[in-house]
């Protein structure tokens, strides 16, 4: 009962949040769940970087985002915090299947994202996995249907959506495309297009890149709905 009241209060606070707010400087000032707040604190994250300050309020308010900010500006938390919060507010459980899919151009970057997710998500009950190949398709497939959040590379993920029986993304709430410029430069356009075909149309999509380019805006046109543009030039 108490938990339900807290959840309703959190939802009300998010509904009250100005998505364009520039006043919020710290994670503590954002309407975040207890598990996320504790995870951020335990990871020693306190002050928002510029891209986080712009993107997190929009993300919490369920907006699609096209964000550009240079390497090192803190884009990972700019999408991971809204992802955790969206699933938390939806009271996502193991029975709800895949709630969030995070696409990265390389295995190494996927592993880095996964490690940050494990750190700041440590007090959440969600299951999370990496889908980057390296293991047999079957070995990966056995665990997929139990995962709430997956961090993946495009080709491998598409292989599972095409071939793994009993696994689908029909319930997906949020799609993240990280390093969209590199995704395009590495020739993953058609894999991402095919991936998106497997996803429900009603979803939130967060797309981030270090640079803006025609290829990135092409990808954005295909996968984002009425996006908010967040572009940060200064140092974070
Ligand atoms: P990007 O994806 O934009 O290249 P990252 O998300 O990898 O940037 O973050 C770059 C570095 O900044 C990481 O070491 C990360 O831990 C740190 N960082 C991110 N957000 C914050 C923050 N709010 N406060 C302090 N350090 C942060
Ligand atoms: Mg990054």
Image (tube, rainbow, N blue to C red):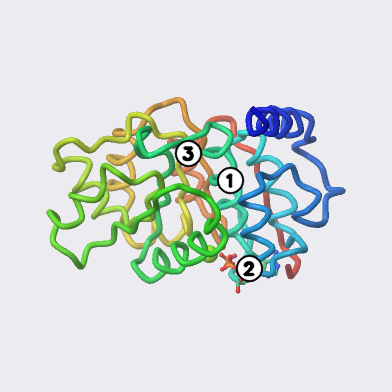
Q: Which residue is mark 3?
A: 174
* Of callouts 2 and 3, the N-terminal one: 2
Q: Quadrant of residue 16?
A: top right
Query: Which residue is more in the foreground, 165 or 22?
Result: 165
Circle 3 crowding by C-alpha within 10 Å: few under 14, some 14–19, many from 20: many
Q: Position of residue 65 (x, y in %)?
A: 59, 42
What secondary structure is marked by label 1?
A: strand
Q: Quadrant of residue 61?
A: top right
Q: CA distance from mark 2 to mark 1?
A: 26 Å
**Would you say the residues marked 2 and 1 are in contact, meaning their CB atoms lie under 8 Å apart?**
no
Mark 2 residue's CB less than 8 Å from ligand 1: yes
User: Measuring 65% from the left and 66% from the top, which residue is drawn there?
Assistant: 42
User: Measuring 48% from the left and 50% from the top, which residue is drawn there?
Assistant: 216
Q: Which residue is mark 2?
A: 43
Mark 1 residue's CB less than 8 Å from ligand 1: no
Quadrant position of the C terminus in the picture: bottom right
Q: Quadrant of residue 137?
A: bottom left
User: Measuring 62% from the left and 34% from the top, which residue is drawn there?
Assistant: 63
Query: Which residue is more in the foreground, 64 or 47?
Result: 47
* Of callouts 3 and 1, the N-terminal one: 1
Q: Is residue 144 left or right of residue 53?
A: left
Q: Is residue 76 left or right of residue 38?
A: left
Q: Position of residue 56 (x, y in %)?
A: 68, 47
* Of callouts 2 and 1, the N-terminal one: 2
Q: Which residue is mark 1?
A: 66
Look at the picture and state if 64 lies above or below 120: above
Q: CA distance from mark 2 to mark 3?
A: 24 Å
User: Measuring 38% from the left and 61% from the top, which residue is drawn there?
Assistant: 105
Q: Position of residue 235 (x, y in %)?
A: 74, 70
Q: Residue furthest right?
A: 23
3 vs 1, front mark: 3
């Amino acid at each position: 009962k108490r938990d339900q009241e807290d959840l309703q209060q959190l939802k009300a606070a998010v509904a009250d949040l100005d998505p364009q707010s520039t006043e919020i400087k710290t994670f503590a000032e954002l309407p975040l769940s207890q598990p996320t707040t504790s995870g951020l604190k335990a990871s020693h994250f306190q002050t928002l970087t510029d891209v986080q300050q712009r993107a997190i309020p929009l993300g919490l308010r369920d907006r699609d985002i096209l964000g550009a900010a240079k390497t090192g500006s803190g884009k990972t938390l700019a999408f991971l915090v809204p992802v955790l919060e969206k699933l938390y507010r939806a009271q996502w459980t193991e029975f709800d299947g895949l709630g969030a899919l995070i696409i990265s151009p390389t295995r190494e970057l996927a592993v880095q994202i996964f490690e940050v997710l494990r750190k700041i998500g440590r007090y959440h009950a969600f299951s999370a996995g990496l889908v980057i190949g390296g293991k047999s398709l079957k070995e990966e497939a056995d665990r997929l249907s139990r995962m709430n959040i997956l961090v993946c590379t495009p080709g491998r993920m598409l292989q599972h959506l095409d071939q793994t029986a009993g696994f689908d993304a029909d319930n997906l709430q949020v799609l993240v495309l990280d390093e969209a410029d590199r995704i395009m430069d590495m020739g993953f356009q058609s894999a991402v297009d095919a991936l998106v075909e497997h996803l429900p149309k009603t979803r939130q999509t967060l797309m981030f890149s270090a640079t803006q380019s025609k290829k990135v805006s092409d990808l954005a046109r295909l996968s984002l709905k009425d996006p908010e543009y967040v572009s940060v030039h200064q140092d974070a």
